[in-house]
Amino acid sequence: MNKMEEELNYTNAFEELQTIVTDIEQGEISVDELSEKVKRATALIKFCKLKLTTTEEDVNAILKELEN
Amino acid sequence: MPKKINDKTIFSLLEVTNSIKKTLEERYKSAFWIKAEMNKLNHYSHSGHCFPELVEKRDGKIIAQIKSTIWRDDYQNINRNFLRILKEPLKDGIKILFLAKIAFDPAFGLSLQIIDIDPQYTLGDLENEKRETIKKLQLEGLYDKNKKLQLAFLPQRIAIISVETSKGFGDFKDVIDKNAWNYKFFYLLFPSILQGDKAVPGIIGQLERIKKVLHHFDAVAIIRGGGGDLGLSCYNNYELAKAITLFPIPVITGIGHVTNETVCEMIAHTNAITPTKLAEYLIQKFHDFSVPIQKAKEKIADKSRRLLSEENTKLESELKLFRSITVSILNTNENRIKNASYAIKQQSQFIVKNNQEKLNVLQAKTRIATKFNLNQLKVAVIQLREKLELQPILYLKNSEHALENIEKNIQIMDPINVLKRGFSITYSNGKVVKDISLLEEGAAINTVLFNGTIDSTITKINE
């Protein structure tokens, strides 16, 4: 897991993505920043999509907790 | 018959009970409508008969109690009516209005034989219970506790209270597991009976278990379905409703019936009504998350492309402007140069012509002046030649005269002539004595005279 994913959860990833979209839409991003922002947005989208299609929960771990 | 023993009339138990039976039968000939609470139904499935416990309570205390019976055929009729009208079978713990005869059996004692039960009365009672539950929850401020909880942005981990084999749970799994978008959910079943009175402790018990592993879940889903519309009055139970509304994470219901909404469905965070709709609701939550991401992707791509294209256009127009400005500057300068070179050509031709004319004038003047000068020089040459021809003759005459004078002077200058006039010349060691300081006393000197020489010795020098 890289650093970004440790700090991100899907709520703040989603919000950050929306902020980037708004900034780009309102033309508040210069060509100089564009590449960096698009790169970040791509990473956020990838992260969010991964969240939609995977889960880390483990049935056995929960059952163990229930027994205790 | 009674026997008389020692003045006492003694009855057998059967005689007494038969007597009671006779008296009661004479006194209570017809059936009565009675209202009571049915604590226990006591249905024996083998015989098909029921032996309900009937009570009347006041302030929670039993103030009247009697056994009763419902024979198999009556029970089947009554239960059919209940199911039709209440969507509930005849069950423990309800208030009933029933038609009964007082029955007395010598062996089994006094009881009420229930012939019929009015389902409408019980329906009203169940509605009352529902109203009471709602009122109580509202008074305690619990009614919308669960509704106020924020459902996770992505409700992905679901604790399910259902029955493994129920059709409702199957429907739910079908929708969730086979979703076309590949959304991944995590769910774990906490099995419980979902209808009838046992559902209340069953569901509450599973909610307690879920609480222990709460951090693994985003929501609880109560899923029922396929069992018909029967036995749902448990969802109006105050204790169950309270357990749900106070649950620390959202509870979603998909109990799957079409009649009146139960209290548990009303106070749940979300009532999806059916298990399938509950699954679709969760998938919709994923869509709510996924669609903006997809849109964001498109928007970013589109806007970035547009931004770049705008910048490109700007750059190109700058370039065009630059090109046109430079071309115009070049043109202007080329024209200037052309004009200048034309001017230089014109000017120089004029200057050349002008100077040519001046030159011509000068040439003409020079020619005239030269001619004049030559004439003058010719005259001067002639004059000079005349002078030259005259000059040597004069010079010769002058020279002759000078020579004569020089000859006279030379004759005067000859020492013989000086010596003749009495002068003499003194020599010392062959040299003429001109300075007396060079002489010494006793030295020999020679004195030359006009006609002879004297040798002498110096005796004395006077300076």
Image (tube, rainbow, N blue to C red):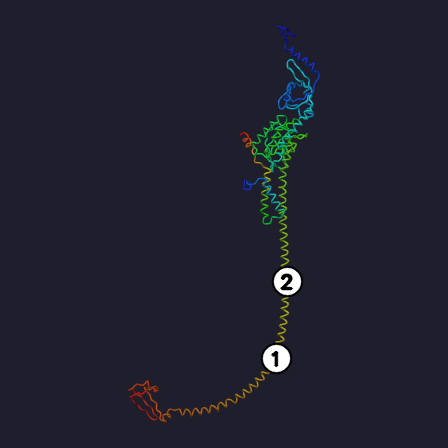
Q: Quadrant of the C terminus of chain B?
A: bottom left
The one of B146 and B17 positioned closer to us in this rendering: B17
Label 1 secondary element = helix
Residue B215, image x, y percentages: 56, 34
Q: Quadrant of the N terminus of chain B?
A: top right
Number of the label disc, if any, that sits on residue B53: none
In the rendered structure, which amino acid carries the disc numbered 2?
Answer: Thr
Residue closest to the far right: B30
**How many C-alpha atoms fall within 10 Å of the one at disc 2: few (<14), some, or many (≥20)?**
few
Protein chain holding label 1: B
Q: Quadrant of residue B201?
A: top right
The answer to whether B145 is drawn above or below residue B371 in the figure is: above
Q: Quadrant of residue B98?
A: top right
Instruction: Give the Cα separation between the discs numbered 1 and 2.
Output: 48 Å
Q: Is label 1 on the same chain as label 2?
A: yes
The one of B99 and B138 positioned closer to us in this rendering: B138
Label 2 secondary element = helix
In the rendered structure, which amino acid carries the disc numbered 1?
Answer: Lys
Q: How many marks?
A: 2
Q: Quadrant of residue A62?
A: top right
Residue B379, image x, y percentages: 57, 86
The one of B421 and B43 positioned closer to us in this rendering: B43
**Which of label 1 and label 2 is nearer to you?**
2
Which mark sits nearer the N-terminus, 1 or 2? 2
Would you name the residue on which mark 2 appears?
B332
Number of the label disc, if any, that sits on residue B365: 1
The answer to whether B268 is drawn above or below residue A24 in the figure is: above
Residue B320, image x, y percentages: 64, 56
Protein chain holding label 2: B
Residue B93, image x, y percentages: 64, 24
The one of B364 and B336 positioned closer to us in this rendering: B336
Residues under numbered marks 1 and 2 in contact, where contact means CB atoms less than 8 Å apart: no
